[in-house]
């Protein structure tokens, strides 16, 4: 199994979605434990009903696809803020994972 490591983004802090979701419609940089990233995208909430109860899908989406899991970490971005530059940390990534991440 490939282990993905959140990159260091100078001046920014990753927030775990299940601890605090962004505002609906928020522009974000997001990273998913099982896929990697980061991806520039948007957070949206989609309510749905099941068995007479209302629930919410928490969706992080970008041109690369979407994620709806609580293992998402994100950095909120202002609408006109440039996408932050992150640093790959070779000391924290094994050789197989580093090869996978070369295309970021």
Image (cartoon, rainbow, N blue to C red):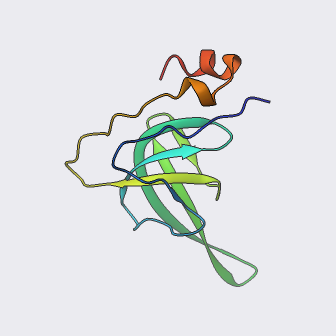
Does residue 35 lie above or below 14 as drawn? Answer: above
Point 46% across, 40% down: residue: 8
Say which of 12 and 78 sits in front: 12
Tell me how many marks there are: 0
* Residue lying at the far bottom of the rendered structure: 52
Point 24% across, 41% down: residue: 82
* Residue lying at the far front of the rendered structure: 91
Which picture quadrant has residue 97?
top right
Point 41% across, 53% down: residue: 75
Q: Measured from the top left, where is residue 53 in percent x and y?
A: 68, 83
Q: Measured from the top left, where is residue 2 in percent x and y?
A: 74, 29
Q: Measured from the top left, where is residue 17 in percent x and y?
A: 55, 61
Point 37% across, 51% down: residue: 12
Say which of 69 and 50 sits in front: 69
Residue 44 horizontal side relative to residue 98, left or right: left
Where, quadrant-wise, is the N terminus in this rendering?
top right
* Residue lying at the far left of the rendered structure: 80
Does residue 87 lie above or below 99 as drawn? Answer: below
Residue 104 horizontal side relative to residue 78, left or right: right
* Residue lying at the far right of the rendered structure: 1
Q: Measured from the top left, where is residue 3 in percent x and y?
A: 71, 33
Residue 41 horizontal side relative to residue 47, left or right: left
């Amino acid at each position: 199994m490939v282990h993905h490591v959140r990159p260091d983004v100078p001046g920014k802090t990753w927030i775990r979605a299940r601890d605090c979701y962004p505002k609906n419609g928020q522009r974000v940089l997001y990273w998913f434990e099982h896929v990697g990233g980061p991806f520039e995208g948007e957070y949206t909430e989609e309510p749905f009903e099941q068995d007479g109860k209302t629930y919410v899908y928490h969706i992080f989406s970008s041109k690369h696809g979407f994620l709806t899991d609580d293992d998402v970490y994100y950095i909120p971005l202002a609408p006109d803020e440039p996408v932050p530059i992150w640093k790959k940390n070779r000391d924290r990534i094994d050789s197989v994972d580093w090869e996978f991440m070369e295309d970021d």
